[in-house]
Image: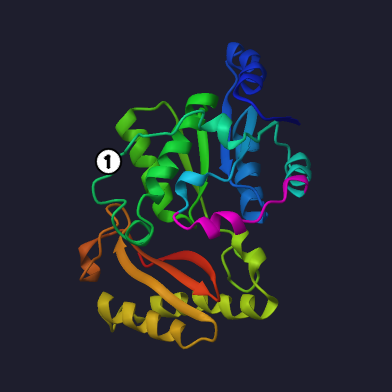
């Protein structure tokens, strides 16, 4: 496994595989890797002749400077994990390497980035699109792998690829959960054991809400989830919405869509967690 820190070194490593026509897969990460990331990398290794993983905490997608400062960084553990599961190249650039000058590009995703995460983190998805498009340009992968836990991010990346007509297949991979049901996240490292126990109620309550579809409207289910989670110690819902899984716009009746997703953001103490669940 090669670890490189510059675009020049990355391109040198990729030159021969490209000339040989090898398939290249990409897993973009912000490090502090866990089993969820490992699942993405294992899928990438299985489906491509070369697996590239990026480890980069992207400053342009953080609204809160404190969140950026506190984001966990565990490079040596990350390399050990990636080596053990067969990654070929790990690209670990500095901020200056990715952004030699400020990125002033503004992407238009219509309503996709105005709801859910976008409503509470303005500019976040523009930052995601900036960095992902740069990595696509540097690496020119045939496939790129993203976790479904970040459901809205997956939709945004797919839309960006469609708009820019990029020759890359976006592969969504199912959310990996801890035994308690808590969605695996790098941010979980900042939770105490007691907070983790409380945070596991998020998914349990969302699962319970899927049983209410026959008797309650989407709005009533939204209220049920928010009230139930807010009644758990340490938890505070920032938003919960039941939306069309393609447009991400709220639905008012279950027959409004064949693809229905519930998406949530919850503070557990001062740690912000996101998750989602499929209703249909």
Q: Where is residue 67 in the image (x, y as percent from the top left)?
A: 54, 59
Q: Which of these two is toward me, 35 or 128?
A: 128
Q: Where is residue 225 in the image (x, y as percent from the top left)?
A: 39, 80
Q: Which of these two is toward me, 215 or 141?
A: 141
> What secondary structure is marked by label 1?
loop
Q: In this view, does 9 lie above or below 209?
A: above
- In magenta, the rendered stretch is 63-76
Q: Is residue 171 left or right of residue 42?
A: left
Number of callouts in the render?
1
Circle 1 residue: 108
Q: Which of these two is toward me, 214 or 20?
A: 20
Quarter of the image that includes the N terminus: top right
> Which residue shows up at 32% across the image and 79% down it?
221
Q: How crowded is mark 1: few (under 14 residues within 10 Å), some or many (20 or more)?
A: few
Report the coloring of the rendering.
rainbow
Q: In this view, does 133 lie to the left or right of 213?
A: right
> Which residue shows up at 38% across the image and 41% down it?
158
> Which residue shows up at 35% across the image and 37% down it?
160
Q: Is residue 100 left or right of residue 195?
A: left
Quarter of the image that includes the C terminus: bottom left
Does the magenta-highlighted stretch encompass residue 71? Answer: yes
Query: Residue 66 falls in which quadrant of the image?
Result: bottom right
> Which residue shows up at 30% across the image and 59% down it?
115
Q: Position of residue 226 (x, y in %)?
A: 38, 80
Q: In this view, does 142 lie to the left or right of 156?
A: right
Q: Is residue 175 above or below residue 266?
A: above
Q: Where is residue 51 in the image (x, y as percent from the top left)?
A: 64, 32
Does the magenta-highlighted stretch encompass residue 239? Answer: no
Q: Is residue 42 above or below residue 48?
A: below
């Amino acid at each position: 496994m090669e670890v490189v820190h510059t675009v020049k070194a990355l391109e040198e490593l990729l030159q021969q595989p490209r000339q040989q026509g090898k398939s290249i897969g990409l897993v973009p990460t912000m490090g502090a890797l866990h089993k969820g990331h490992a699942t993405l990398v294992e899928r990438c290794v299985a489906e491509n002749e070369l697996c590239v993983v990026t480890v980069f905490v992207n400053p342009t997608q953080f609204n809160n400077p404190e969140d950026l400062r506190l984001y966990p960084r565990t490079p040596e553990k990350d390399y050990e994990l990636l080596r053990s599961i067969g990654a070929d190249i790990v690209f670990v650039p500095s901020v200056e390497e990715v952004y030699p000058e400020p990125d002033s590009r503004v992407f238009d995703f219509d309503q996709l980035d105005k709801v859910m995460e976008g409503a509470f983190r303005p500019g976040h998805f523009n930052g995601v699109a900036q960095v992902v498009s740069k990595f696509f340009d540097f690496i020119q992968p045939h496939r790129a792998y993203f976790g479904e836990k970040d459901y809205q991010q997956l939709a945004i990346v797919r839309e960006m690829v469609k708009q820019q007509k990029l020759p890359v297949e976006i592969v969504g991979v199912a959310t990996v959960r801890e035994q308690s049901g808590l969605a695996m996240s790098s941010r979980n490292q900042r939770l105490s054991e007691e907070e983790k126990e409380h945070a596991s109620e998020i998914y349990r309550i969302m699962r319970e809400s899927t049983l209410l579809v026959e008797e309650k409207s989407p709005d009533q289910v939204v209220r049920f989830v928010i009230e139930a989670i807010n009644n758990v110690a340490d938890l505070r819902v920032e938003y919960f919405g039941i939306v069309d899984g393609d447009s991400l716009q709220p639905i008012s009746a279950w027959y409004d869509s064949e693809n229905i997703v519930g998406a949530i953001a919850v503070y557990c103490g001062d740690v912000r967690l996101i998750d989602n669940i499929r209703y249909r």
